[in-house]
Image (cartoon, rainbow, N blue to C red):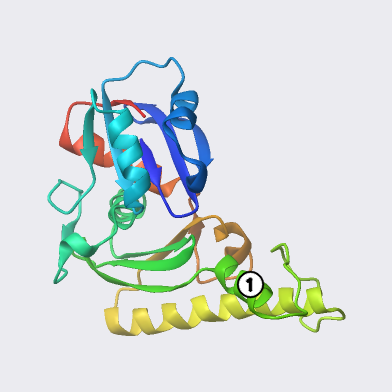
Amino acid sequence: MIDISNSFTKMAFSKGSRLGRITRIATRLLTARSLGKAIGSRRFNSVVLSSVVPGSEKIVLKYLAKKRVLRVGPDLNLGVGIDYPHPRSIGADRLANAASAVSVCGAPVIVVDFGTAVTFDIISRGGRYVGGVIAPGLEVMTDYLYQRTALLPKIDLLEPLHAIGKSTRAAMLAGAVYGYRGLVKEILIEIKKEMGPPDPRVIATGGYAKLIAAKAPEIEEVHPNLTLEGLRIIGMLNSRPLEGV
């Protein structure tokens, strides 16, 4: 399984229902050489691929030219339906998240993915992908402050000790983490209003999922490997059990 996101390319071998050790490569550093090193001498026949970075996807497809590659898209059996005006515009990672979420939690469910952007993907009680929300990612927002202001520093994101910062860094940290939890909470409130009963489960994945979910009761579960698990599930649904990256 290979998932190419804007920040990291993640891959894992799988066999049946088991996902193996996950390898991460910064997507900007992804080359045929780094990919080959990550794969090593492992033997495999098939690959399930999710990508939102066309240039990096070309590198992977060229390297795996002799393998069977299943590229995730709306034409595959995802285990969920799609009720969306332009299905091909849905990111492959978001389709994988939807497939995994329904397998884990059933429907209705909302997936919050904390990546370079934070995405909210909504699966209705009928098990259909009906749309989503996209907002700037937490790290993107804090990096923007650092890059566009003369005196604000770059900060490491972690749980603030206080809401009232006693230093520039502490003030930025409080604004980032508490403010971001507020963003997530308000978006979930509005989504749930439109969905109506029954209340959907809310699960999270992505780099800052644990940090934000720690004090956000709206998020019920965190699944760090949700996207890769979704790729494994899609592979199982569309072919014989895959033994591959």
In the image: residue 73, left or right of residue 112: left
For the residue labelled by badge 1, is the local secondary structure a helix, a strand or a loop?
helix
Q: Residue at x 15, y 68 (%)?
A: 86
Count of numbered badges drawn on the protein: 1
Q: Is residue 162 visible?
A: no
In the image: residue 111, left or right of residue 157: left
Residue type highlighted by circle 1:
Thr
Q: Is residue 243 depicted above or below 225 in this figure?
A: above
Q: Is residue 176 depicted above or below 79 in this figure?
A: below
Q: Is residue 214 depicted above or below 102 in this figure?
A: below
**Residue 25 placement (x, y as % from top left):** 52, 40
Q: Residue at x 30, y 48 (%)?
A: 103
Q: Residue at x 24, y 24 (%)?
A: 67
Q: Residue at x 76, y 71 (%)?
A: 153
Quadrant of the image for the N terminus? Answer: top left
Q: Nearer the viewer, residue 36 or 44?
A: 36
In the image: residue 97, left or right of residue 74: right
Please identify the residue farthest to the right as the structure is shown. 166
Q: Quadrant of residue 201?
A: bottom left
**Residue 5 placement (x, y as % from top left):** 42, 51
Quadrant of the image for the C terminus? Answer: top left
In the image: residue 111, left or right of residue 61: right
Q: Quadrant of residue 141?
A: bottom right
Check disc 1: other Cα within 10 Å, few if <14, some if 14-19, many if 20+.
many
**Residue 198 placement (x, y as % from top left):** 30, 73
Q: Would you name the residue on which mark 1 appears?
A: 142
**Residue 88 placement (x, y as % from top left):** 17, 60
Q: Is residue 219 visible?
A: yes
